Amino acid sequence: MQVLPDATEINRLRWQCRRGMRELDLLLLQFLDTGYADLDATGAQAFLRLLDSPDAVLLEWLLGRQRPSDKEVADVVQRIRGAAAT
């Protein structure tokens, strides 16, 4: 089942996606705009867990240098990387 976030939720997520590192900001905000709505409830929760990660770790994941141990977060990372490739 897809998650249909309201405007308040999207604004809160948009704020959390702004990390102060241009590369992360671009990847996370692009995914929020183009792929987040396609996540189911499990994926949306994994995205929130991903956003709780330190910037250095996020960068390693999103650049493909490391892989999250949490399978659901790893799936979201792959979606973000896929969205960036298009």
Image (cartoon, rainbow, N blue to C red):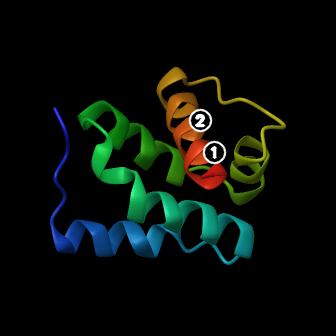
Quarter of the figure with residue 28: bottom right
The image shows residue 5, relative to residue 14, as above or below, that is: above
- Residue 9 image offset from top left, x and y in percent: 24, 66
Q: Quadrant of residue 8?
A: bottom left
Is 65 left or right of 14, judged from the image as shown? right
Does any portion of residue 21 appear in the rendered image?
Answer: no
Tell me what residue is drawn at x 33 percent, y 71 percent.
Answer: 12
Q: Left or right: where does residue 34 sit relative to residue 23?
A: left
Closer to us: 79 or 11: 79
The residue that mark 1 highlights is 81
The residue depicted at 40 percent of the width and 51 percent of the height is 35
Q: Helix, strand, or loop for circle 1?
A: helix
Numbered disc 2: secondary structure: helix
Residue located farthest toward the front when viewing the structure as drawn? 86
Q: Position of residue 22 (x, y in %)?
A: 72, 75
Q: Nearer the viewer, residue 39 or 54?
A: 39
- Using the image, tell me which numbered label, if any, was put on residue 69: none
- Residue carrying label 2: 78
- Could you classify mark 1 by the number of other residues whose Cα lies within 10 Å: few (under 14), some (14-19), or many (20 or more)? some
Q: Quadrant of the N terminus?
A: top left
Residue 62 pos. (x, y %): 70, 47
Report if the CB atoms under discs 1 and 2 are less than 8 Å apart. Answer: yes
Tag count in the figure?
Answer: 2
The answer to which quarter of the image holds residue 55 is bottom right
Q: Could you give the CA–CA distance between mark 1 and mark 2, rounded to whole angstroms?
A: 5 Å
Give, as a three-letter code, the residue at label 2. Gln
Horizontal and vertical percent position of residue 24: 67, 64
**Residue type for callout 1:** Arg
| Left or right relative to 59: residue 49 | left
Q: Residue at x 67, y 78 (%)?
A: 20
Q: Residue at x 19, y 39 (%)?
A: 2
Near mark 2 (Cα within 10 A), the count class, few <14, some 14-19 or many ≥20, is some
